[in-house]
Image (tube, grey):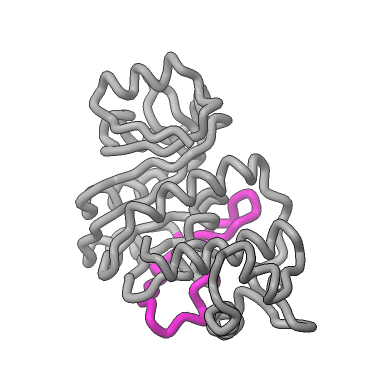
Amino acid sequence: MKKKEMRLAAIMELIKTNQFMNIDQLCQSLNVSPATVRRDLAFLEEIAQIQRVNGGAIISKNQKMALPPVRLLDEKQRIAKAAVDLVNEGDTIFMDGGTTNLEIASKLALFSNITIVTTSIELAHIFSQRKDISIFVCGGIMSDVNPRVSIIGPLAEKMISYFRANLCFLGTSGIHIKSGITAPSLTSAEVKNVMMRHAAKSILVADHSKFGKVHPAFVCPVEHFDMMITDRQAPQEDIDQLASKGVAIQLV
């Protein structure tokens, strides 16, 4: 992540945490000039991340669609921070839906010159104000899951196959050492498989609550992922077995 992108992410985090930050507070927290803060706030307002008010800023009311509260939000945000550190300018990235990938997307929205290919309408919405990020939303059948809308089916799979990605960030509903990675439906499982087949590096992003769970649709063996990013509450025995199978592990 570049210096500017790190600063923008820090501004967003400060405003989210404190609900409001004025320019002086941001200058002191980031050790930058008022002119730099004003430029950054203008950029964040332009891409609909914040709203400038009374000499400072708040989070934009339009930043995200209205959705239920996210469980384990702190863990997901730490996972997201580690994930975006793997992204380079010019990368093409596959992303499916899910709350962890939404947190990753909110941080990627501060990047420029990247391409996102996604099956998540909600995730695509995060990038809607960015002119310097290419966003491709796959066509297909709308699937309403928990209650986040994503696209599944053969049309989505075909469109994904036209791309070659540097990175693939995938969430999951279930991680089990013997049963593998599983999903609620065969159609969502196949979308994940197609993304993995056409990406140079596949990264599983999931918090500790997904371990030990098995769902009806098999995605792949755990060792098919190049890397997993999870939080430190993940069961150590499972982490050790994943590492023994050649999966690079990053705990956050």
- Between residue 187 and residue 199, name the one nearer to us: 199
Residue under the image location 23 percent in, 65 percent down: 163
Furthest-right residue in this view = 54
Segment colored magenta: 126-151
Residue 128 counted in the magenta span = yes
User: Which quarter of the picture shows residue 33?
Assistant: bottom right
Expressed as whole percent of the image width and height from the top left, the position of residue 105 reads: 48, 61
Above/below status of 55 relative to 193: below
Residue 135 counted in the magenta span = yes
Expressed as whole percent of the image width and height from the top left, the position of residue 216 reads: 48, 32
Residue under the image location 49 percent in, 32 percent down: 174
Expressed as whole percent of the image width and height from the top left, the position of residue 249 reads: 35, 32
- Between residue 236 and residue 37, name the one nearer to us: 37
Residue under the image location 48 percent in, 69 percent down: 109
In the displayed structure image, the side of residue 161 where residue 168 appears, left or right: right
Expressed as whole percent of the image width and height from the top left, the position of residue 226 reads: 26, 38
Above/below status of 66 relative to 49: above
Residue under the image location 29 percent in, 62 percent down: 88
Where's the N terminus, which quadrant?
A: bottom left
| Number of marks in picture | 0
